[in-house]
Image: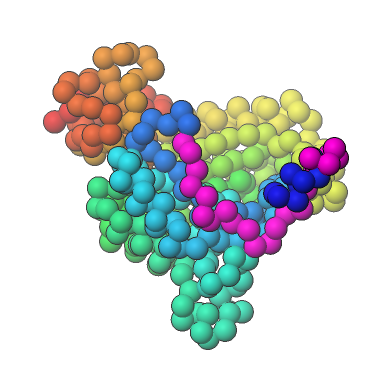
């Protein structure tokens, strides 16, 4: 930065687009503008090493590197001191977090014995943040399926303040398309991992990402995606049709050969399945009591609060004597595709 400033002072344009392999901005405490003062985000990694063929992130944010765990815990403690009630640990792939005393990530088996002994995995980090304050709800996003290990699931089970929700992007239900996407897993492997999550954490909410119309996707591939969504019961999904990104492997290697009207029709079918599943899962919560963190006033009714339960589902209920930032037990009386509606108990 000082070099860039000196160039500007000398009358030159100063541009630096080189992506550091080490820098994590670990000591910079962000100023949170337009925050509700209740929920906050902590970046624990920068960049990505996964090289999914459709994704531009490795080219725009560089190789993956992890922040010092002590700086992350300190930031969480600072947020608690300022009255925040929930933090979300963020990264393009949070589960691959690994600190061994250096910034750039290495595979665990490539570390020296000393580095392995002193390393901090994502499961370790999640536990460290959970221990900051039992009243601080801890979330994390986003996960790559290949890195959701049992150790992470058992930490989630051990700590009540670690929210029981995992964002678990599938992208496609077709093994052939997953291979073209360079996702490194098959449909069968993904379903087995989903079942393992539910085995250890039966109450865990699972959400996903779905892309329709990826290069060469056939109707059979599309039907595989629809069947996966019915098999895995995602609480909600982020759903898109494929849009080519310059510089990615897919843009260089594959033809974007699915007509846009086909992509959109398939996306509509994906959305319809997700709505069907969401309505059923939400309806099953009627009569249940959920612990909800109040985040804001409901957008549709100034006399109601909006918060989220552990599974990251919106819950709406009358204000009563509660305030933003309160944890409230809410009995669910009815539901919609996207929300649970109830009363405090």
Residue at 63 percent of width and 31 percent of height: 267
Please determine whether, in this image, residue 202 is positioned above or below residue 70.
above
Residue furthest to the left = 345
Residue 15 magenta-drawn? Answer: yes
Label total for image: 0
Identify which residue, 221 or 113, lies in the foreground.
Answer: 113
Identify which residue, 48 or 182, lies in the foreground.
Answer: 48
Please determine whether, in this image, residue 320 is positioned above or below residue 145.
above
Identify which residue, 41 or 217, lies in the foreground.
Answer: 41
Residue furthest to the front = 10
User: Which image quadrant is residue 233 in?
Assistant: top left
User: Which image quadrant is residue 241 in?
Assistant: top right
User: Which image quadrant is residue 129 in?
Assistant: bottom left
Q: Position of residue 277 (x, y in %)?
A: 43, 35
- Horizontally, residue 169 falls left or right of residue 117, namely right
- Horizontally, residue 325 falls left or right of residue 108, namely left
Residue range in magenta is: 9-32
The answer to whether residue 41 is visible is yes
Residue at 60 percent of width and 61 percent of height: 65
Residue at 36 percent of width and 45 percent of height: 79
Residue at 44 percent of width and 56 percent of height: 72
Q: Position of residue 202 (x, y in %)?
A: 32, 53
- Horizontally, residue 154 falls left or right of residue 119, namely left
In the rendered image, the quadrant that contains the C terminus is top left
- Horizontally, residue 59 falls left or right of residue 50, namely right
Q: Position of residue 247 (x, y in %)?
A: 81, 46
Q: Position of residue 172 (x, y in %)?
A: 62, 46
The answer to whether residue 138 is visible is no
């Amino acid at each position: 930065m000082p070099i860039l400033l000196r160039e500007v002072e000398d009358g030159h344009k100063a541009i630096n687009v080189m992506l550091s392999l080490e820098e994590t901005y670990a000591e910079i405490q962000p100023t949170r503008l337009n925050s509700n003062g209740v929920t906050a985000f902590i970046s624990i990694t920068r960049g990505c090493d996964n090289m999914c063929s459709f994704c531009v992130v490795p080219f725009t944010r560089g190789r993956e590197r992890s922040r010092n765990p002590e700086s992350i815990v300190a930031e969480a403690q600072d947020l608690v001191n300022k009255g925040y009630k929930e933090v979300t640990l963020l990264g393009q792939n949070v589960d691959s977090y690994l600190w061994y005393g250096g910034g750039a990530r290495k595979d665990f088996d490539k570390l020296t014995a000393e580095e392995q002994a002193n390393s901090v995995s994502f499961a370790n980090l999640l536990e460290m943040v959970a221990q900051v304050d039992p009243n601080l709800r801890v979330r994390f996003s986003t996960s790559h399926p290949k890195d959701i290990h049992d150790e992470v699931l058992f930490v989630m089970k051990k700590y009540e303040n670690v929210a029981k929700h995992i964002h678990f992007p599938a992208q496609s239900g077709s093994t052939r398309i997953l291979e073209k996407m360079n996702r490194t897993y098959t449909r069968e492997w993904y379903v087995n991992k989903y079942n393992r999550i539910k085995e250890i954490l039966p109450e865990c909410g699972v959400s996903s990402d779905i892309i329709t119309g990826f290069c060469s996707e056939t109707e059979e591939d599309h039907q595989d995606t629809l069947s996966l969504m019915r098999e895995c019961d995602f609480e909600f999904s982020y759903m898109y049709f494929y849009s080519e990104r310059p510089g990615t492997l897919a843009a260089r290697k594959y033809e974007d050969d699915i007509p846009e009207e086909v992509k959109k029709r398939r996306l509509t079918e994906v959305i319809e399945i997700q709505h069907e599943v969401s309505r059923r899962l939400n309806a099953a919560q009627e009569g249940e009591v959920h612990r909800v963190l109040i985040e804001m006033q409901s957008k549709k009714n100034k006399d109601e609060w909006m918060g989220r339960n552990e599974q990251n589902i919106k819950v709406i209920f009358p204000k009563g004597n509660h305030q933003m930032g309160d944890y409230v037990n809410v009995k669910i009386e009815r539901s919609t595709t996207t929300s649970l509606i109830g009363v405090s108990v």
